[in-house]
Image (spheres, grey):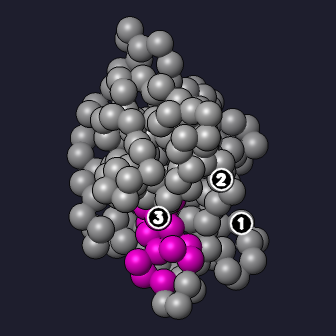
Amino acid sequence: MADLHDSWQRDFDVYDRVKTLGINLGAREDAVPAPSGRRICMVTFTPSGLVFTSGTGGGVGAVTNDDADVESGYEAGREAGIAHVVTLHWALHPFGTLNDVWYCVKCIGMVNSAGGGAFSRSPQVVDGYTTVFHDVFGGPMSRFAEDGIDASLSGWHARSAVAGFDLPGHCKIEPEMIVQIDPQLALRIIRERGPHI
């Protein structure tokens, strides 16, 4: 791993957390289908080592300020977060693993809701997505944290949580994530497989 500050180093295997969280990594063809007929790719690797995921949907239906709706949106965010962890695993395979993610950079979370200020709780919905990355890679909101302190901050990230969208497939949430990996690993993937998957 890069010469990162100690707070971003991990002394745990990410896959131990994946197992504890009950995340099923499944099969590559289910997580990252062949490119034939797809409009967009699932993941893009850059020479700088930044890795961009396309948006993925979670849940169905619009979210209101109702507590039950927000909780349902939070769970939809977790569903989307798990989908992205699985996608990243298979996008890195066979060249690398989730342990090669140095840290998470930025999440953009879009929430299906009425516009014009009618909905004000998008951060709570997108928290469902964010906590998955804290749980897997380490962060203050992680279930492994004690008093908001985890063994690593590598899952902590910048974020925008915005609402007022009609989302594809009427999903509740469509988040994206950017993570950082070793630029040398990214270049190897780009050379040997291409930048998109």
Specify start and end residues of the magenta stretch as a single range: 129-145
Residue, disc 2:
159
Where on the picture, by quarter, is residue 51? top right
Circles 2, 1 touching at the beta carbon (< 8 Å)? no
Which residue in the structure is indicated by mark 1?
Answer: 2
The amino acid pointed to by label 2 is Arg
Name the quadrant of the N terminus.
bottom right
Name which residue type carries label 1.
Answer: Ala
Q: What residue is drawn where x is 40% and y is 42%?
A: 63
Answer yes or no: is residue 53 visible.
no
What element does badge 1 sit on? Answer: loop
Mark 3 lies on residue: 131
Residue 158 visible in the current orientation: yes
Residue at 47% over, 36% down: 113
- Neighbour tally class for label 2: few under 14, some 14-19, many 20 plus, Cα within 10 Å: some
> In the visual, does 52 lie left or right of 26?
right
Residue 183 in the image: state x and y as whole percent: 71, 48
Q: CA distance from mark 1 to mark 3?
A: 24 Å
Q: Indicate whether residue 131 is drawn in magenta.
A: yes
Label 3 sits on a secondary structure element that is helix
Say whether disc 3 or disc 2 marks the residue closer to the N-terminus: 3
